[in-house]
Image (cartoon, grey):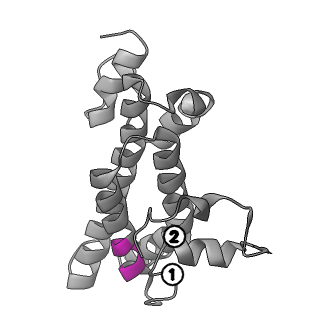
Amino acid sequence: MHIDSDRKQFSPSSVGGKPLGENTLNSALMSFSVGSPDALRKLEEGGFWLEAYRQGVKGDPMRAYQVVDRIDVLMQPYRLEATREYLGSGGRQQTYRERRIWHAVVHFAQELASGYETCLQMFQAGVPGSPQLAPLVPTVTARAPGTTTAPSGTTSGCPASGLMMRLFGRS
């Protein structure tokens, strides 16, 4: 199932007379929700889904935010579990598994930031549906890692930093 194949998946309304439960909603959104029990594998797949969705997002900033936010929420326990495993093993990237965990966590964080940045870019461009995202811009900005400026006023180096500078009129 394509991640964006049915817009009604995010609606808490009913389908066929039955309300969508949280597990049904998650299963419909994330085809891997019943897959591998390994937190690392799920985190790698979450990063893949973020990247794939971001590259294929059409032009609905609210929908993009909903998908990125849902993946963020779904992946939080797996990200924490993988991070605990990495830190518990010493965190020195000496084994293949430690390097794989490091890469998965970093890749997921980068894709998460890029997903939120895509929402902000669509909002800034004024694509149809942007006014719906307006009340969420502070939330999206806060959740996108590295979208703030450093104390000295220089950008933090994240791609969203320049966007935030333009949004707040400091370009």
Asked if the residues shown at circle 2 and circle 1 are in contact, with their CB atoms under 8 angstroms apart, the answer is: yes
Q: Nearer the viewer, residue 129 or 37?
A: 129
> Of residues 4 and 110, which is closer to you in this image?
4
Q: Which residue is mark 2?
A: 29
- Label 1 sits on what residue type? Ser
Task: Locate residue 132, reporting x and y percent.
Answer: 59, 32
Please tell me which residue is depicted at 44% across the width and 29% down the height of the picture. 123
Side (left or right) of 114 relative to 15? left
Residue 143 magenta-drawn? no
Label 2 sits on a secondary structure element that is helix
Per the image, the residue denoted by label 1 is: 33
Which residue corresponds to the image point at 36% horizontal and 66% vertical from the top-left? 49
Relative image position of residue 159 (x, y in whole percent): 26, 35
Q: Work out whether 86 lies above or below 160.
A: below
Look at label 2 and name its amino acid.
Leu
The front one of 114 and 40 is 114
Give residue 97's quadrant in the image: bottom left
- The span picked out in magenta is 41-45
User: Visible in this render: residue 95?
Assistant: no
Q: Residue at x 32, y 28 (%)?
A: 161
Q: Position of residue 19 (x, y in %)?
A: 77, 71
Q: In which quadrant will I find the C terminus?
A: top left
Q: Name the quarter where the N terminus is drawn.
A: bottom left
Report crowding for label 1: few under 14, some 14 to 19, many 20 or more residues within 10 A (C-alpha): some
The residue drawn where x is 35% and y is 49% is: 57
Q: CA distance from mark 2 to mark 1?
A: 9 Å
Asked if residue 127 lies left or right of residue 28, the reply is: left
